[in-house]
Image (cartoon, rainbow, N blue to C red):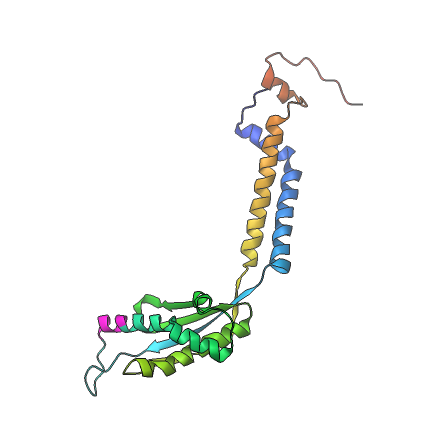
Amino acid sequence: MEKKIDMKTLVGYLKRYAILLLCTTLLGISGAYIWVTQMAVPMYQASSDTLVKPQKLVEGDIKLDANTNNRLISTYTGILKSNHIIDKVKNELKLTDKPETLAQKLTIKNENDSQIISVSYTADSPEKAIQFVNTTVATMQQEVGNLIEDNTIVILSKAEEGNIVSPNKNMSLATGALIGLMIGAIIMFIHAFTNVTIREETDIHEVTVIPVLGEVEKW
């Protein structure tokens, strides 16, 4: 029996399999909730803002040159993620992770080409994230004087709290609901197109043009 899909047929399938779709959606949400609350390791991020002051190009005068300032910010960004800084932070905090692993968790942002560099670090606890960020910017400020002639780093704000960044509970639940709904829809279509049982008058019209003369009531 070849079945054709139209809007009326689709609506009929949705009504017939509404309980199935609801159950698979709820199962998807339940699975996502269990994963978020019981299995997923929460990750926290802490941030600190630093100001890169323009260099003194003329004694007693501060001139802000856009190209020079951008190069300076790029240089500091590279220094922040260099093994020179990472190793010092690692040794001070007595961490066992490889410098490459620590650098991957470190995020450096320069918003809208401003003179402010935002330093963020992601860890499995807010305390670790805060400690690493504050130690990194403090080490950076201390070491810049040794690496560059003028120390132009000013710490604007230290990391004081760590915000959870993953897992995203709402996004995970929405994803679980979507996956559950998709599984239910797949089951619905497979069952609908492989089931050749004639249950209703509409099923008869799909396979023959012979008119229905009557129905036998269920006892």
Q: Quadrant of residue 57?
A: bottom left
Query: Could you tell whether 101 is left or right of 23 in the image?
Result: left
Query: Could you tell whether 50 is left or right of 61 in the image?
Result: right
What residue sits 65% from the left and 47% below the top?
27
Magenta-drawn stretch, dominant element (helix, strand or loop): helix
Residues 217 and 133: in front is 133
Magenta highlight on residue 83: no
What residue sits 63% from the left and 43% below the top?
24
What number of labels is visible?
0
Image x and y of residue 18, in percent: 64, 38
- For the C terminus, give its image quadrant: top right
Q: Is residue 184 visible?
A: yes
* Residue 88 higher or lower than 26, as above or below: below
Image x and y of residue 14, in percent: 60, 35
Query: Could you tell whether 50 is left or right of 126 in the image?
Result: left
Image x and y of residue 124, in percent: 55, 67
Q: Is residue 134 visible?
A: no
What residue sits 62% from the left and 11% below the top?
210
* Residue 179 higher or lower than 127, as above or below: above
Residues 13 and 118: in front is 118
Image x and y of residue 50, in percent: 38, 76
* Residue 53 higher or lower than 205, as above or below: below
* Residue furthest right in the image: 219
* Residue furthest left in the image: 58
Query: Could you tell whether 199 is left or right of 182 in the image?
Result: right
Q: Quadrant of residue 4?
A: top right
* Residue 213 higher or lower than 70, as above or below: above
- Tell me the magenta residue range: 65-71
- For the N terminus, give its image quadrant: top right
